[in-house]
Amino acid sequence: MPLKSTRGSNYPDWYQNVISVADMAEVSSSPGCMVIRPWGYGIWERIQRVLDDKIKEIGHENCYFPLFIPLSYFQKEAEHVEGFAKEMAIVTHSRLTMQDGKLTPDGKLEEPLIVRPTSETIIADSFSKWVKSYRDLPIMINQWANVVRWEMRPRLFLRTREFLWQEGHTAHATYEEAEKEAKTMLDVYAKVAQNALAMPVIKGRKPEHEKFPGAVDTYCIEAMMQDGRALQAGTSHFLGQNFAKSANIRFQNNEGKQEYAYTTSWGVTTRLIGSLIMTHADDEGMVVPPKIAPQQVVIVPIIKDKSQKEEILAYAHKLASALSSQIYDGEKLRVKVDERDKEAVDKMWEWTRKGAPLVCEVGARDIQNNGLMLRTRNKINTPDWKKVVSFDNFVQTVSERLGTFHQELYQAADKRLKENQRTDIKTAEEMQAYFSHQNSWIDGSEGKVAFVRGKWCEDPETVEKMKEMKISIRCIPEDQTNEEGVCLLTNKKATLDVIYARSY
RNA sequence: CGGAAUGUAGCUCAGCCUGGUAGAGCACUACGUUCGGGACGUAGGGGCCAUGGGUUCAAAUCCCGUCAUUCCGACCA
């Protein structure tokens, strides 16, 4: 029995269904916010672990900055404040008092505090104190935190008022070094997306009108969702000297002269979990890539007769312990025996909907044969879904099976990305015709909309045109052909290659 | 923040038009039958009908306000 809504019947509803049946998150009673449930948070913890290791490998250190930022800090960088002004949560009072039987805010603050939507301004303030000499540079820090942006139309994982992220901030002595840092971090994001999340991405740079407020250059990775929309899965900004000048991050160079530092910032958010769902989930629920699955193998005991319970559980634990000593992706396998007092089938389907990669059923028959019944999540509804495997064979091959699982997820997503990225659209008229369709599940049939790779002339008038077509330039990809062609919005001569799409 | 729709049990919804103080299915609990099956039977628990006000002898039902959710738009990771 598939979900209430499928990808084909109602894509947005399907997305919410997956989150709900997989117990990943729910809408909170606190408006616009989400509760991230253990299975969803477990995935986030795995992503954190993988990414945190990479961030530290490069030489960044974790630290923590305040949640509250004085209002005046935002006034220092004009572009920055303009970009965020419309979506800020502002603390104006410090206590409640009872007035006419109603709790009323009282103790008005001298200066209102902003609940951080991002921390460039407050971190730049610290950087200015930390940096005196070129010998103090570079500064390379990162923080795992929550941020608040007052969204008017929330969607679980994709757009909520509060979300979790990692934000890295660095300061460097030279333009080149800072720019290289921004690009290095983009590479890290792309690799983590591909290697851990099994999600292929397109690396590129944002056009001028899509840049982060206050940035010189914004780099990004863009992924293709199953309805052909683009989702920005990570972003890295080269901030030039903009924030250094507004916060006075200056240092003395080796010639004794004062110079402004060059800064960067980069981040990924819990939105990645949304992208994971729309990359891998199917009409039966979630499918979690093994490297970030909280449980990679779940063992469900089949107990028909209570007298067999002890023996079957002992066998299940023997299997779990044998599997746990196996190594996949440099770590011991994460294995769970589901001992809850529930029907075995119910448990099996629950793990299917949650998307645990491998589910093993073990019962009396398996003890007899020294085997197990293996269900491989991504093969659901195919002949390879259910297989009887011997105990020893499974223990020996489990890491390889998880590796294959990851590969298959990646290949399916990569195939979708390649097959739905049109490069044969050559005129503004063809472009209009292509984007005349609504986005819907790209199931290989005709009339589907996804990405178009083509030319852009950079004229300001194209921005309005794209708004009308409800599309945007997702990025200017790294691999430019440098051949002259025709702009897909104006038919004017153009050489810049861009990715056009609708987006989340 | 603009437009539309919706708000009744944990979930999906009926009841509202034509006022008379609550229903179904699923889920949950117990017992039983089954079960490597996305079961079945019997019994049971659970709702001051989003919220505040108004009309009325009487409001889930009619009227007004507020809040929330979903979809569309603007904005955004």
Image (cartoon, rainbow, N blue to C red):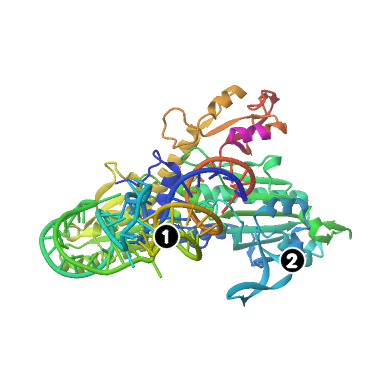
Tag 2–tag 1 contact (CB < 8 Å): no
Q: How many marks do you count on the picture? A: 2
The residue carrying pointer 1 sits among few (fewer than 14), some (14 to 19) or many (20 or more) residues within 10 Å by Cα, namely: some
Closer to the camera in the image, A49 or A332: A49
Residue sitting at 83 percent across and 61 percent down? A251
* Dot label at residue A39: 1
Outermost right residue: A256
Specify the segment rendered in magenta.
Answer: A463-472
Q: Say which chain tag 2 marks.
A: A
Badge 2 is on which residue? Answer: A126
Q: Quadrant of residue A58?
A: bottom right
Name the foreground residue: A465 vs A197.
A465
Q: Amino acid at mark 2?
A: Ser
The quadrant in which the C terminus of chain A is found is top right
Circle 1: element type: helix
Q: Is residue A262 left or right of residue A31?
A: right
At which x and y percent is residue A7? Answer: 40, 41
Relative to residue A495, is residue B43 depicted above or below? below
The quarter holding residue A332 reads bottom left
Dot 2 crowding, Cα within 10 Å, few <14, some 14–19, many 20+: few
In the rendered structure, which amino acid carries the disc numbered 1?
Trp
Residue B23, position as x, y percentages in the image: 26, 57
Q: Quadrant of residue B22?
A: bottom left
x, y percent for residue A459:
72, 31
Q: Is residue A121 left or right of residue A28?
A: right
Q: Is residue A50 magenta?
A: no
